[in-house]
Image (cartoon, rainbow, N blue to C red):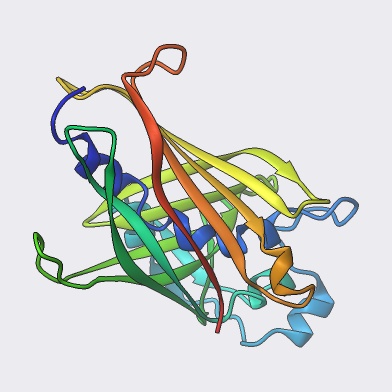
């Protein structure tokens, strides 16, 4: 296992923590048809007015050329509007022994109606969240603030996806498991090997915190990292854990 894989994994999984609190609501409801296109009723009840004016949305694709139009937020997207926040612990480093040192941080993501968009070329619809992660100073590290984009959406065929964009780099995540009864979902991103860096798999396990009450939006999130081949990894363990909810 090469020395700086924690840094690489850290940038790869930025955004996935906050995303998990609401990503379940993006998934198509059985019998509801294509969730990517809001119904006429949702258009009427939408929290904004659509516009036919094209806008550059390349930033949502990590800098790749893309053109979008603003659309009314569908019922599912309207559920995101506002601010989501939570406190987390992120793996900072591993001691020579078995102990691991975690660093606390506070993550906030805001969604606005103006950021409900449709890609005019692909037909996919999505909402862009603006995320800020704040790390307090510690004995070994100065205070830090990381800003990124969190995109939650559906392809034209209704397939849900999640994307984080930081420093012009976009990372996509795929849904690998969903349990509606438990209100639980699991998302993964596979990072191929590159040079001396081994392949990695980042997995987010997100579930409703039932102990917080039936009406609570609070959710518990655990992020794991597997370094190397899944059948024979060099290292695997928890790299982020915490909870968050809509404010």
Quadrant of residue 109 in the image? bottom left
- Residue extending furthest toward the top: 232
> In the image shown, does 108 or 40 lie closer to the viewer?
108
Compared with 218, 177 (above or below) is above
Is residue 183 toward the left or the right of residue 129 in the image? right
Quadrant housing the N terminus: top left
Residue 90: where, in percent of width, then height? 33, 54
Residue 76: where, in percent of width, then height? 70, 69
Residue 125 visible to an observer of this rendering: no
Is residue 131 toward the left or the right of residue 48 in the image? left
Residue 227: where, in percent of width, then height? 33, 26
Please tell me which residue is depicted at 62% across the width and 71% down the height of the picture.
218
Please tell me which residue is depicted at 28% across the width and 43% down the height of the picture.
100
Quadrant of residue 245 in the image? bottom right
Please tell me which residue is depicted at 51% across the width and 60% down the height of the picture.
19
> In the image shown, does 35 or 54 lie closer to the viewer?
35
Residue 20 visible to an observer of this rendering: yes
> In the image shown, does 11 or 102 lie closer to the viewer?
102
Quadrant housing the C terminus: bottom right
Residue 181: where, in percent of width, then height? 83, 51
Compared with 108, 201 (above or below) is above
> In the image shown, does 151 or 108 lie closer to the viewer?
108
Compared with 45, 137 (above or below) is above
Please tell me which residue is depicted at 60% across the width and 74% down the height of the picture.
80
């Amino acid at each position: 296992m090469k020395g700086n894989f924690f840094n690489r994994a850290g940038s790869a999984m930025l955004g996935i923590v906050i995303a998990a609190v609401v990503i379940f609501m993006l998934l198509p409801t059985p019998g509801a048809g294509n969730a990517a296109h809001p119904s006429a009723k949702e258009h009427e009840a939408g929290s904004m007015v659509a516009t036919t004016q094209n806008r550059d949305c390349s930033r949502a694709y990590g800098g790749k050329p893309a053109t979008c139009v603003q659309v009314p937020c569908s019922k599912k997207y309207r559920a995101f509007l506002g601010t989501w926040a939570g406190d987390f612990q992120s793996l900072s480093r591993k001691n020579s022994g078995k102990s691991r040192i975690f660093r606390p941080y506070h993550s906030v993501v805001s969604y606005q109606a103006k950021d409900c968009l449709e890609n005019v070329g692909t037909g996919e619809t999505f909402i862009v969240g603006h995320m800020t992660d704040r790390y307090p100073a510690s004995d070994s590290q100065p205070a830090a603030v990381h800003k990124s984009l969190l995109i939650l959406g559906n392809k034209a065929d209704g397939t849900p996806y999640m994307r984080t964009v930081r420093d012009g780099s976009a990372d996509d995540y795929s849904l690998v498991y969903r349990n509606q009864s438990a209100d639980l979902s699991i998302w993964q991103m596979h990072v191929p090997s590159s040079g001396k860096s081994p392949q990695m798999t980042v997995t987010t396990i997100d579930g409703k915190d039932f102990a917080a009450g039936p009406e609570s939006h609070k959710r518990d999130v655990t992020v794991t990292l597997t370094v190397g081949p899944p059948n024979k990894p060099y290292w695997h363990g928890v790299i982020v854990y915490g909870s968050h909810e809509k404010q």
